[in-house]
């Protein structure tokens, strides 16, 4: 997909370079908050990944509730849970990630990708960032 076509498909907008979390990503990601963090029960943000960009393995922790939902809106990406095969993602796909599940997500190597990240409310909720996805494992995905 050409960059201009992706930008047209990415209806919620790319946002700004995600500098606050750059240490947990391989490649550049962009963040466009759609709601205000801490101002309500749900936080929504459009996260855009350049081709080849992915986040590190991570776990959304909570003692009750918590987790994350991904609403795929543009481009092509991957989602993988620890010990399971990667799943190809396209616009319209929805991924429900319960608290406590080790996973990663990001763009395919030849495509931009965007999803709305929804933080599910929970008690004592937070993200635990872990190791990067190994290049060899990522590059082997087809």
Image (tube, helix red, strand yellow):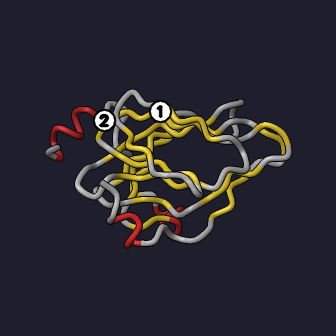
Q: Residue at x 34, y 36 (%)?
A: 90
Disc 2 target residue: 10
Q: CA distance from mark 1 to mark 2?
A: 12 Å
Q: Name the residue at the front extreme.
A: 84
- In the rendered structure, the answer to whether residue 72 lies left or right of residue 95 reads left
Q: Tell me residue 39's x, y (percent).
A: 69, 34
Q: Nearer the viewer, residue 87 or 13?
A: 87
Kindly indicate the quadrant of the structure image that contains residue 98: top right
128 is higher (above) or lower (below) than 79: below
- In the rendered structure, the answer to whether residue 89 lies left or right of residue 71 reads left
Q: Residue at x 24, y 39 (%)?
A: 7
- In the rendered structure, the answer to whether residue 7 lies left or right of residue 74 reads left
Q: Is residue 106 visible?
A: yes
Q: Tell me residue 53's x, y (percent).
A: 37, 60
> Which quarter of the image is occupied by the C terminus?
bottom left
Disc 1 target residue: 71
Query: In the rendered structure, which disc, 1 or 2, sits on the residue that comes first in sequence?
Result: 2
> Which quarter of the image is occupied by the N terminus?
top left
Q: Tell me residue 96's x, y (percent).
A: 59, 35
68 is higher (above) or lower (below) than 42: below
Q: Tell me residue 41's x, y (percent).
A: 71, 30
Q: Is residue 36 visible?
A: no
Mark 1 packing: few (<14 Cα in 10 Å), some, or many (20+)?
many
Q: Secondary structure at mark 2?
A: loop
Q: Name the residue at the top extreme.
A: 92
């Amino acid at each position: 997909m050409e960059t201009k076509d992706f930008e047209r498909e990415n209806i919620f907008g790319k946002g700004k370079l995600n500098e606050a979390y750059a240490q947990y990503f391989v490649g550049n990601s962009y963040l466009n908050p759609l709601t205000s963090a801490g101002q309500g029960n749900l936080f929504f943000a459009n996260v855009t990944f350049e081709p080849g960009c992915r986040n590190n393995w991570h776990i959304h922790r909570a003692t009750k509730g918590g987790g994350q939902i991904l609403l795929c809106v543009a481009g092509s990406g991957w989602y993988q849970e620890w010990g399971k095969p990667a799943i190809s993602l396209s616009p319209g796909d929805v991924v429900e990630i319960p608290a406590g599940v080790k996973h990663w997500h990001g763009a395919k190597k030849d495509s931009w990708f965007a999803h709305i990240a929804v933080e599910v409310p929970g008690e004592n909720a937070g993200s635990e960032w872990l190791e990067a996805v190994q290049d060899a494992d990522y590059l082997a995905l087809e």
